[in-house]
Image (tube, grey):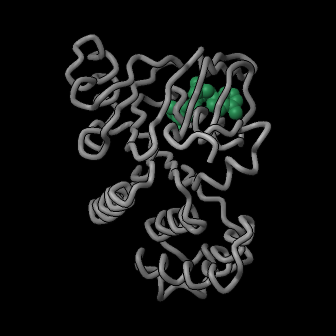
């Protein structure tokens, strides 16, 4: 890694969709080992930011780096360092869930023997061992969510990026995911998640970023941000939608 202290660095990032400025000159860093939550109402620009960091979306201005590598010019290096748990399910319909994990590991150059072992460990950890030989459409919604997590983790990435990981989950699954993310963070992994649940941000993160209408309102230590009276409009909008 070229820069091992700063996991994600975003500088003056601006992104337009045809009729909308989705990200308006946003800048912030996420330190290695941090647990960062990006909180904001629907449409704030959270998913767009994740798509830019992971190279899924282009942008108009700015610089985005992962451990010092540019996400456009050095896409391969950055992609390997990141595990993405997206908001929507996008699995290959022809593979069993175990195959799906092993193939995903293959994209990152992991040998099948090692990949299979890791896939089995993750399936066990997320209580999917029984389902390992079925295709994803035979899974319940909660199981698919757990499979998304397994896939994000299969290449043992340094940074785990999760887009609203517990949206629509029942309590049991929510706590399973929270526990596992806290454990990964204790083991030194950098976590970046988006949420529109105040509770999730309050419980989990160390650093909290507030985004609304494509602009950063504040980034800082969780407690200080949550006590910032000038952010009440965003907090109200977020809790009002719950
Ligand atoms: N592919 C797209 N084309 C046009 N507008 C988009 C597209 N994706 C997102 N948007 C718009 O960009 C804004 C930010 O969206 P998004 O990043 O998905 O917000 P969030 O994840 O915070 O809910 C919203 O107004 C959304 O409607
Ligand atoms: Mg989103």
Instruction: Give the image quarter of residue 62.
Output: top right
- Tell me what residue is drawn at x 58 percent, y 33 percent: 49
The residue at the far top in this view is: 230
Q: Position of residue 98 (x, y in %)?
A: 61, 81
Q: Is residue 118 above or below residue 162?
A: below
Taking 166 as reference, is 152 left or right? right
Instruction: Give the image quarter of residue 20.
Output: top right
Q: Nearer the viewer, residue 146 or 167?
A: 146
Q: Position of residue 229 (x, y in %)?
A: 22, 13
- The total of numbered circles placed on residues is 0
Q: Position of residue 179 (x, y in %)?
A: 30, 61
Q: Nearer the viewer, residue 87 or 65?
A: 65
Taking 100 as reference, is 151 left or right? left
Instruction: Give the image quarter of residue 21.
Output: top right
Taking 22 as reference, is 233 left or right? left
- Tell me what residue is drawn at x 28 percent, y 36 percent: 198
Q: Is residue 225 above or below residue 72?
A: above
Q: Is residue 69 above or below residue 176?
A: above
Q: Nearer the viewer, residue 155 or 165?
A: 155
Taking 133 as reference, is 235 left or right? left
């Amino acid at each position: 890694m070229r820069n091992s202290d700063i996991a994600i660095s975003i500088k003056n990032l601006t992104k337009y969709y045809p009729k909308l400025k989705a990200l308006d000159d946003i800048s912030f860093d996420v330190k290695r080992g941090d647990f960062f939550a990006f909180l904001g109402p629907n449409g704030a620009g959270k998913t767009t930011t994740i798509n830019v960091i992971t190279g899924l979306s282009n942008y108009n201005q700015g610089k985005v780096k992962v451990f010092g590598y540019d996400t456009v010019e050095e896409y391969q290096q950055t992609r390997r360092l990141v595990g993405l748990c997206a908001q929507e399910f996008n699995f290959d319909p022809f593979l069993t869930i175990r195959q799906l994990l092993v193939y995903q590991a293959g994209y990152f150059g992991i040998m099948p023997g090692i990949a299979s072992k890791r896939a089995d460990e993750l399936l066990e950890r997320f209580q999917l061992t029984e389902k390992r030989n079925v295709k994803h459409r035979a899974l319940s919604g909660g199981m698919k969510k757990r499979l998304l997590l397994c896939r994000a983790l299969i290449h043992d990435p340094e940074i785990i990026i999760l887009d609203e990981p517990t949206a629509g989950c029942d309590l049991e699954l929510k706590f399973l995911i929270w526990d596992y993310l806290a454990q990964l963070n204790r083991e030194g992994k950098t976590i970046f998640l988006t949420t529109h649940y105040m509770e999730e941000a309050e419980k989990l993160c160390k650093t909290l970023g507030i985004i609304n209408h494509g602009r950063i309102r504040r980034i800082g230590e969780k407690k200080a941000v949550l006590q910032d009276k000038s952010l009440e409009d965003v907090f109200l909008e977020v809790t009002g939608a719950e």
